[in-house]
Image: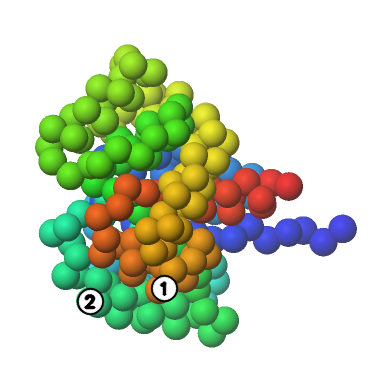
Amino acid sequence: MARRIKPLIFVFWEGESEQSYTKYLKAAFEDVAVIRFPSNSGLFLEAKNMFKNNPKYRNNAEVTDEIWFFFDTELKKVAHWERNYKIIKELRKLRKSQIKVRLLMTTACMKYWVLLHYERTAPAIASPADKERMKDRVKRHVPLYEKGDFGATCEIAKNYETAIENGKWTLISLVDDGLPTLEDTDNRNRWLYQGTHTFTTVHEAIEFLVKLKE
């Protein structure tokens, strides 16, 4: 039987919580995927610079299968879509067969994605008070949860199967609101990135990893 080559995935992350969750995924799925991520936070411009200037990234571009961006969507970022989309298209072309770029987006705060590991809910999340309520709800399930805490993140992330189903639900719920498609397309992602709806797409990346185990 031929040995299956593990896909190589580079993850660029926004905050400590995304970094901790990525560490969990790296460990939990190391048997089916090679997940690498920089030690410093940074998203689209960071990825562009890393693949241009860092040999560890540049020299692996042709064998890179996927690039993930793990972040929150907020109104103040809406104007950045076109700049970021230009970088996405550049990154895809680093490999002859094109690199898959995934946007692991969650409305307003990572804590909402965390809460979906326990609850099926889609409250409006915009203000600092809304985000604080998300944290309080998470702590009802995991009292020791704090931003970026790896131990608490691992306890939470083990419930990723529930989070996958709840994540799918957040998108299905937006179809009547005008979501262009449930498929991972540029058109859909632009709509989500620039909108104000409560959602996540993180589950799609994890579902990809789960299927590799099958």
Q: Position of residue 67 (x, y in %)?
A: 44, 64
Residue position marked by numbered label 1 in the rendering: 186
Q: Residue furthest right?
A: 1
For image coordinates 36% across by 74% down, the residue present is: 88
Q: Is residue 214 left or right of residue 43?
A: right
Q: Is residue 117 left or right of residue 31?
A: left
Contact? badges 2 and 1 (CB < 8 Å): no
Q: Quadrant of residue 208?
A: bottom right
Q: Secondary structure at mark 2?
A: helix
Q: Quadrant of residue 131?
A: top left
Q: Nearer the viewer, residue 96 or 126?
A: 126
Using the rendered image of the protein, determine whether residue 154 is visible from the camera's viewpoint: no
What's the residue type where badge 2 is placed?
A: Arg
**Nearer the camera: disc 2 or disc 1:** 1
What's the residue type where badge 1 is placed?
A: Asp
Q: Residue furthest front?
A: 176
Total numbered circles: 2
For image coordinates 38% across by 31% down, the residue present is: 115
Q: Quadrant of residue 43?
A: bottom left
Q: Position of residue 194 (x, y in %)?
A: 26, 64
Badge number at residue 116:
none
Q: Position of residue 66 (x, y in %)?
A: 50, 65
Badge number at residue 83:
2
Q: Is residue 79 above or below residue 6?
A: below
For image coordinates 19% across by 70% down, the residue present is: 80
Q: Please report whichever mark, 2 or 1, sits nearer to the chain's N-terminal start.
A: 2
Mark 2–mark 1 distance (CA, rounded to whole Å): 14 Å
